[in-house]
């Protein structure tokens, strides 16, 4: 897929990957990914470190992570964030109300001038961990190149 910017003077390629993620929703745990689809072609270089690292080539990115969960009490909540090359990036996501704030989606935008690593981590939790419903915990990564 391509799109035009700047008054139709610049063309950029747009790619998208969809992934599912899983793991234990406890603080400081990196989550595990499985690639579902990449269109129009593959751009994720590989999944490493027990599938917790998404290896990406240079480019401009927008990533979102959505969580589906089951809990047995209303005070079971967690917060999750993206990490780019080891540094927390973007806006956190949370299940229901974590610290009286609701934000269902973790999202970040970033640019890589060379290869880099994207990870998703549980950054905080209340009480006991929620159960992640693996088949419905989704991540979407968009990539553009100039």
Image (cartoon, helix red, strand yellow):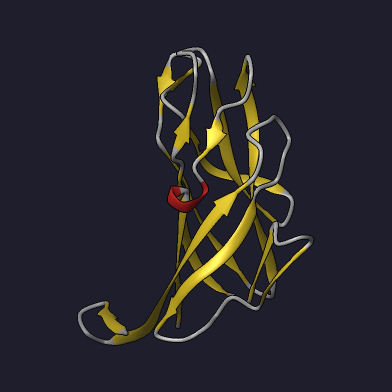
Residue sitting at the far left:
7
Q: Residue sitting at 52 percent across and 83 percent down?
A: 42
Looking at the rendered structure, the number of numbered marks drawn on it comes to 0
Residue lying at the far front of the rendered structure: 72
Q: Position of residue 135 (x, y in %)?
A: 47, 52
Q: Where does the image place residue 142, in percent across and percent down from the top left? A: 43, 67
| Closer to the camera in the image, 109 or 48 | 48
Please give left or right for residue 21 compared with residue 50 in the image: left
* Residue drawn at 62 percent across, 23 percent down: 125
Looking at the image, residue 92 lies above or below residue 7: above
Q: Is residue 4 above or below residue 62?
A: below
Left or right relative to 113: residue 28: right
- Position of 138 relative to 4 (above/below): above
Rendered residue at 70%/46% (across/down): 30
Q: Quadrant of residue 39?
A: bottom left
Taking the spot 47% from the left edge, 48% from the top edge, the residue there is 137
Identify which residue, 61 or 52, lies in the foreground.
52
| Quadrant housing the N terminus | bottom left
Location of the C terminus (image quadrant) = bottom left
- Left or right of 73? Residue 48 is right
Residue farthest along the right direction in this orientation: 49
Image vertical order of residue 137 relative to residue 40, above or below? above
């Amino acid at each position: 897929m391509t799109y035009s910017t700047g008054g139709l003077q610049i063309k950029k390629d747009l790619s998208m990957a969809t992934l599912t993620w899983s793991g234990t929703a406890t603080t400081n745990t990196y989550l595990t990914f499985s690639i579902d689809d990449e269109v129009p072609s593959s751009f994720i270089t590989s999944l490493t470190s027990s599938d917790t690292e998404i290896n990406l080539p240079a480019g401009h990115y927008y990533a979102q992570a959505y969580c589906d969960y089951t809990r047995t009490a209303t005070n079971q909540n967690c917060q999750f964030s993206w990490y780019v090359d080891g540094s927390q990036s973007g806006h956190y996501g949370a299940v229901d109300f974590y610290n009286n704030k609701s934000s269902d989606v973790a999202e970040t935008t970033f640019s890589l001038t060379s290869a880099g690593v994207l990870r998703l981590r549980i950054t905080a939790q209340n009480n006991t961990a929620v159960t992640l419903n693996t088949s419905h915990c989704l991540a979407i990564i968009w990539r553009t190149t100039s």
